[in-house]
Amino acid sequence: MAKRIGNYTIKMENSPQVVSFASVCGKKESEGPIGEKFDMVFDDTTLGEDTWEKAESQLQAECVNIALEKSKLNKSEIDFIFAGDLLNQCISSTFGLRELNIPFLGQFGACSTMAQTLALASIMVEAKIARHCIAVTSSHFCSAERQFRFPLEYGGQRTPSAQWTVTGAGAIILGEGNNKNSRPVIDSVTIGRIIDFGIKDTNNMGAAMAPAAASTISDFFKDTESSPSDYDLILTGDLGEVGSRLLCELLEKENIDISKVHSDCGLLIYDQKEQDVHAGGSGCGCSASVLCSIILDKLKEKTLNNILFIATGALMSPTSSQQGESIPSIAHLVNIKNNL
Amino acid sequence: MAKRIGNYTIKMENSPQVVSFASVCGKKESEGPIGEKFDMVFDDTTLGEDTWEKAESQLQAECVNIALEKSKLNKSEIDFIFAGDLLNQCISSTFGLRELNIPFLGQFGACSTMAQTLALASIMVEAKIARHCIAVTSSHFCSAERQFRFPLEYGGQRTPSAQWTVTGAGAIILGEGNNKNSRPVIDSVTIGRIIDFGIKDTNNMGAAMAPAAASTISDFFKDTESSPSDYDLILTGDLGEVGSRLLCELLEKENIDISKVHSDCGLLIYDQKEQDVHAGGSGCGCSASVLCSIILDKLKEKTLNNILFIATGALMSPTSSQQGESIPSIAHLVNIKNNL
């Protein structure tokens, strides 16, 4: 059975396996450096729907369907789906997945949601409470802009530290482990605490979230008595340029140097120079679609064998920011590896 | 270890215990029939804060603090907090609980959230992944009215089927079971599927949610091969008058008669005739504060010994309703009992 190690980390003993994974994205993401790695690209980002919210729901539905197809599992073999997104009342998940008829547990961790859904799904499989679980999340540039910033028609200007919300989704199906298939497994997870350093600039989410990432990464190294050189890759969710630099600086103060193995989904998904995304990609769909494409591909091919995935979330709302509040943040960590 | 029984139910083997519980409420709730049962009453529903959202955050913080005090546990003995609420991006939870420094997992199940947090918390304790977990949720009449309906100053009229959002919160601390203290335990949980019967009237949430409650209750009886007469109380979250009637009718069609043991938190919290609440109470804080006051009191006193708690959630947003969408709903069930 899973056991707690140190203060915050859960170490799996039954090796919940990545049975399948899928990613979908929009046109802009398909034109980026990893554009060819996604399972499906929607050049028309409306997905034929009449609102952006419905389009985002469709992203999640399509992504889950592809993951199900790849898994060769029947829907009835999936015991729980953990899903979430950025929209008010998480409507892209609830509307996108309502046809599935699978027990549903809605998660909210802002852009940390992919790590949160994956952590809880792996615990359910580890504890033998589920045979298989789906972890899924999405974001859509147009629904996020309208809800969190300005209607697209307004043509608002963006600051250099602003990030670009990814149109995309990622889904993973986890199942009971056995080493026959030599699939990547979830080895351990660290659930984050809410960290608030008082940052109030909603156009600089990377800065708000970096302390949460630093806290969770530091907790994990202490709990597991490991160090950055033990991992092939330390992949943060969507800190972007500003947040990534801050994360490395914060960890350096604790004598943890991740610079040689650190990468950030927000920096991988777009071409920073050519695609005019300022500080990088963001949104639940950013870390989800990057993890569920190029990263898990490499784990499957065994060109990566032991990675830390740390998705970070900014837990504010437009209302809290209008009321002058700072941005509480959180980061959850999932250690994914090949049992070689 | 916990095991799955039937299609949707998880049966606990380690009897996660209710270590402590707490409830807080506003003035109107304190004037209702169970007003004396709450741990703390805020006659000033601003709680001294300058916005309703901050007041609601404070409700959750106070409620968790009382539950912690009653448990005589140190914060460091709590391994996870499962929390959620109705506000956009769940800000009453994230802001209310950010000082706690406890690993945080944000949940969104609309008004089903208390059952969802309780179900996941009990699984973590059952699987020995946590020593103790907190499950908490809240709602506030004024923050909900502004976000979902009209600003209070508008003085909007309410339809007869409309429900009144409870200003309140409830929190439960679960811990590892041993029968020494003869505390109530979580015996089993059933996680719901999203059900959508096409109801579009956001002033009739009870009708939208009743089919979800019927589905989960029916699943539970099938899975456990039990029947309504096996329980002292079948307590739904906040179906109110309209939804409660519909629930009984829907279950009757399946030859399940719950009418002798059914009650609804939305009907218990206010005096329907005197308090002008139309179809009853609602909001995450409704089922949370009723469960964490009179109901768990009675379980502790052993005047109730075996209950089903089924919180129901309407998974729509104002945006989805404005776009003409129906109201997908969900219900999760928790069986709480005394091991006599």
Image: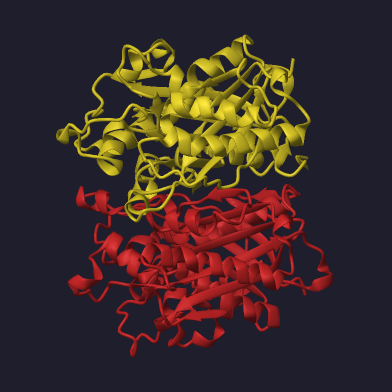
Chain colours: A yellow, B red
Q: What residue is rendered at 27% in x and 73% in y?
A: B161
Count numbered badges in the picture.
Answer: 0
Q: Give x and y (percent) for residue A252.
A: 64, 27
Horizontally, is B62 left or right of B53 in the view?
A: right
- Given residues B200 and A144, the one toward you in this image is A144
- Given residues B174 and B278, the one toward you in this image is B174
Horizontally, is A15 left or right of B22 in the view?
A: right
* Quadrant of the drawing holding the C terminus of chain B: bottom right
Q: Give x and y (percent) for residue A237.
A: 50, 29
Q: Residue furthest right?
A: B180
Image: B333 above or below B5: below
- Given residues B68 and A96, the one toward you in this image is B68
Image: A127 above or below B126: above
Q: Give x and y (percent) for residue A179.
A: 73, 21
Instruction: Decide if residue A142 is in sight here.
Output: yes
Q: Residue furthest front?
A: A253
Q: What residue is rendered at 48% in x and 56% in y?
A: B95
- Given residues A286 and B241, the one toward you in this image is A286
Image: A232 above or below A144: above
Determine which quarter of the picture holds residue B154.
bottom left
